[in-house]
Image: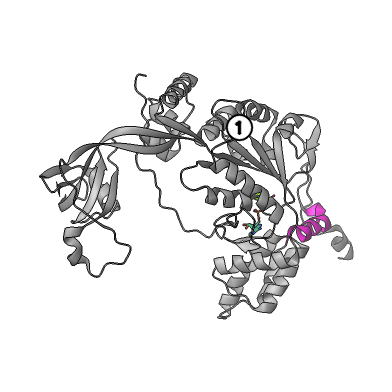
Amino acid sequence: MTTIQTKTETKDVTGLSLIAAHSHISGLGLDDNLQPKENSQGMVGQLKARKAAGVILKMITMGKIAGRAVLIAGPPSTGKTAIAMGLSQSLGNEVPFTAIAASEIYSLELSKTEALIQAFRKSIGIRIKEETEIIEGEVVEIQIDRSITGGHKQGKLTIKTTDMETIYELGNKMIEGLTKEKVLAGDVINIDKASGKITKLGKSFTRARDYDAMGPETKFIQCPEGELQKRKEVVHTVSLHEIDVINSRQQGFLALFSGDTGEIRSEIRDQINTKVAEWKEEGKAEIIPGVLFIDEVHMLDIECFSFINRALEDEFSPIVIMATNRGISKTRGTNYKSPHGLPLDLLDRSIIIHTTNYSSDEIRTILSIRSSEEECELSSDALALLTKIGQETSLRYASNLISVSQQISLKKRQSQIELQDIKRAYMLFLDSDRSVQHVEEHKSQYIDDEGNVKIGLDEDKMETD
Ligand SMILES: Nc1ncnc2c1ncn2[C@@H]1O[C@H](COP(=O)(O)OP(=O)(O)OP(=O)(O)O)[C@@H](O)[C@H]1O
Ligand SMILES: [Mg+2]
């Protein structure tokens, strides 16, 4: 491999706006001094853990540390995953953040260690300075001919600077790019010649009066001068994993989109490591250690843990944040128990953040944030009951009842969720305690570990019949 490519095609997949479990969280909710605010950015309470996460955030953004392990430990639904998500939101776009659930690494296509290596390398960013050739100018006209069958498209792009004007033939890919970026005549754009990436820089001043109905966010710039094709120094950030994939010949670009990367040969990785180290020496690249978040980390086994131990000492290593709700439990693949199910040597390398259960006030606030996130309105006694349920069962169960009781209230054409709806939802859907109780009471009707089951009526009922 003589040259190593680092360019990926545009990879922004437009996110679905699903209401997910953590969609109300937009950061860690810290002030400028990294002190946690009681209720900010969707985050409520859990102050000590958030403050600790803030310190880690600071260390990460300074780019000073790598190869550290952080463990967030605490009871179920106390916001461990939420804090990690908040941290990722606060990191900004430059710092890579990869989140995996430990169980994801057990798949048929990849070995456990390969899956872990990929996750590690996705979490290391390389900021590369490069000269590339671009075409930069003001769009005069875009002409697209769609064939009747809708298959192949053709087109022409007329683009100019103050000194020259050229017409380029457009292929399918460029047409898609221009359509996606909503490029119109009058826009000043640049096109990266190697990757075909189109960037809209603004609208040309000469067209300013055509757009008096434009919003204030429209940026007007001068039509570029000189040659259309220029060399420009650009800085772009890719992850080590992306470089691996692009340069492993049988896979290439497409694998990045499908996620179907297969095993990557270790020689390729070695070559890339050497090259990146060289670039770093020459000042052409900068290494940005990102974050690898491994949720439910107790699902890893002893081999994975020892891999992590070693990987943390690697030249390129991210910060590894792990989360678990296990207490003293068995490490997978061994017969011994250890705190949080983590082997002691890894635990010894980790700094540990604890989360604790919420007070009823905090539960109320989180539930009301969740209900507005789900666009549900709760009457005040409904919220009070939900809070009580949250305290006695779990925050997660209470939060799940919101959307269920909304369905119940919608059926009655109410504008908000009333106490009755919460009660009804509570009766319809069991929390884990009541479910356990139910199973205990009807044990014989379920299939047990020996495969025994009693089909038909309960014994006591049979007797009375
Ligand atoms: N401090 C908080 N502020 C706002 N929302 C929170 C907070 N803590 C938890 N939540 C929300 O409560 C729900 C449960 O929290 P989360 O999933 O983070 O728990 P967890 O500690 O990861 O639990 P588990 O151990 O079961 O994985 C999520 O929807 C989360 O966004
Ligand atoms: Mg979690």
Quadrant position of residue 211? bottom left
Magenta stretch: helix, strand or loop mostly: helix
| In the image, residue 162 above or below residue 113 | below
Q: Which residue is mark 1?
A: 67
Please tell me which residue is depicted at 40% across the width and 52% down the height of the picture.
14
Tag 1: amino acid = Gly
Image quadrant, ligand 1: bottom right
| In the image, residue 191 above or below residue 316 | below
> Who is closer to the viewer here, 401 or 97?
97
Indicate the secondary structure of the residue bearing disc 1: loop
Quadrant holding the N terminus: top left
How many numbered marks appear?
A: 1
Reply yes or no: does residue 432 show up in magenta: yes
Quadrant position of residue 320? top right
Image check: 165 left or right of 338? left
Please tell me which residue is depicted at 33% across the width and 38% down the height of the picture.
234
Q: Within 10 Å of the Cα at label 1, are there few (<14), some (14-19), or many (20+) other Cα atoms?
A: many
Q: As drawn, which residue projects farthest toward the front?
A: 33
> Who is closer to the viewer here, 305 or 229?
229
Quadrant holding the C terminus: bottom right
Q: Position of residue 17 (x, y in %)?
A: 47, 58
**Which range of residues does the magenta coloring cover?**
431-445
